[in-house]
Amino acid sequence: MNTKDFHFLAKVSEILSEKTDTSGLQESLEKSLNEYIEFEKLSIYIFDDVTNTLRYCNECWSIIDDSSEIYNIYESIREHDFVINSKAYKLPPVMGDVKLSIKSLYMPLINDGKIFGIIELILGKDTILDMEFLFLMKIFAAQTALKIQNIVLNEQSKINVDFHDSMKNIAKIIETQYELNYIVPLIGEMLDRFISDHLIYVFLYKDGEFKLVWPKACNDERIYDTLKQLTPETEYLLTNDDKIGAFPLTSEGEIIGCIAARSTLDKLSKRDISYLEQLTRQSAITINRANTYAKVLQYATLDALTGLNNRRQFEVRLKQEIATTKRQKNPLCAMMIDIDFFKKVNDTYGHASGDSVLRTVASIIKEHLRESDIPSRYGGEEFAVLLPYTHIEEAQIVGERLRKAVEAAPIPIDKKNINVTISMGLAEFTPEESGEELFKRADTALYEAKESGRNRVCINKNA
């Protein structure tokens, strides 16, 4: 080999040592090879053992049709060193002064003696090249094969790590939440992030039918047709084209829901199916634990996420405070609080970040109230507060102080701080009304605060 050949191989080695993934690898190799020889196109194809498909490296691993010419070339190159102009060749044991007219050249990518892909080099016109060039291309292919094999192994390792992280995160949801309408979207988001190549849908089974819980819409009737075929004994169901899979969520021999995956391009691979089966089982365990936990917490007093009174305990305390107020003729005010645009926080940063916002706002509420005040998480992003021994003018001062504190508090989300605001409705108890009527008036004032621009305190003065 001459100096030009060594320079080329050194350049290729430098490129391969720098690239850590397939993104841009093909383009960098093209630039290097273009300095050595004029050509029209360089392409890399990898055979995926899991799906038994040939995939194009530079187009998001798109599948090559098995009837295409490139697929046939991949099949014919197995026992040879090259395919030149659609004909397979092996390099001779001794390089002679042989020259070939080459228009297209295909080189195998080999690992442990097994071909796992090919490099396609289209010169565009007949070019006279010698055996030394073919020997150089064999080294080039060997270098590239080693790098791509390492990339594939690294990507698979990352997938396995991400998979186990997803399993752990789904299992941990129950530590902070137990309401299905809250945890199921969390599970959906985690599955969607991991199985990013396919669309994920989560259904719960209620009143004899599957109801979509996450995301907001599913317009593929084939998914609903597949769901109708599920039984508690079903491991999973695939449509005839293997592009839709339904994985039932079961508990104690009964279907409680289903996770569906839909691909718009590829079939669901064996690997995808295996991951989805395991993630579905973990999701079913988590949902079942949440149901059990919710039943236990029916008799508990605190909200698991915020540490405030839960709604059931709030209703108990409301009756107690109304009775005390009527008996002692002391003032009592009710406060309804709603976090402004909370859904946008969930949609932008995810439900885990939404949990952080709820905990922070709850902490600020507790910090700015007296020990005698009774704060509760009323549901979702709503809070209810009872202010015993408080007239409406005093409640308004408390409310404004609380509103400003929330507005000023930085909340760390995804390595940065965000701010949220709250809207608030106030009402003072009158002897003629019930506790429910008091909070209905506070809720009406809250609605007014939200309709008139949010981040404000409004008072309902009408009994």
Image (tube, helix red, strand yellow):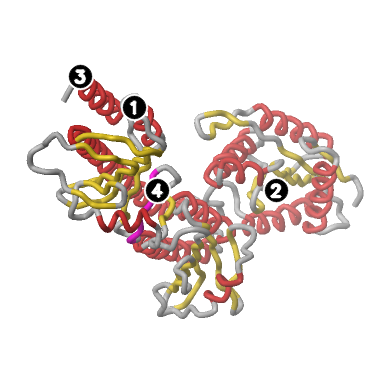
Residue ID at (78%, 58%):
436
- Separation of disc 4 and disc 3 at Cα? 33 Å
Q: Nearer the viewer, residue 187 or 364?
A: 187
Q: Residue furthest right?
A: 462
Q: Which residue is mark 3?
A: 3
The answer for how far apart the CA atoms under marks 2 and 4 are is 57 Å
The residue at which mark 1 appears reads as 32
Q: Amino acid at mark 2?
A: Ala
Q: Earlier in the sequence, mark 3 or mark 2?
A: 3
| Sooner in the amino-acid sequence: mark 2 or mark 1 | 1
Q: CA distance from mark 3 to mark 2?
A: 80 Å
- Residue 232 x, y percent position in the rendering: 44, 79
Residue 2 vs residue 246, the one in the foreground = 2
- Badge 3 density bin: few <14, some 14–19, many ≥20, Cα 10 Å: few
The magenta segment is 52-57
> Depth-wise, is mark 3 or mark 2 nearer the camera?
3
**Towards the viewer: 90 or 263:** 90
How far apart marks 3 and 1 lie (CA) works out to 15 Å
Residue 294 at x, y percent in the picture: 52, 63
Q: Are marks 3 and 1 in contact (CB under 8 Å)?
A: no
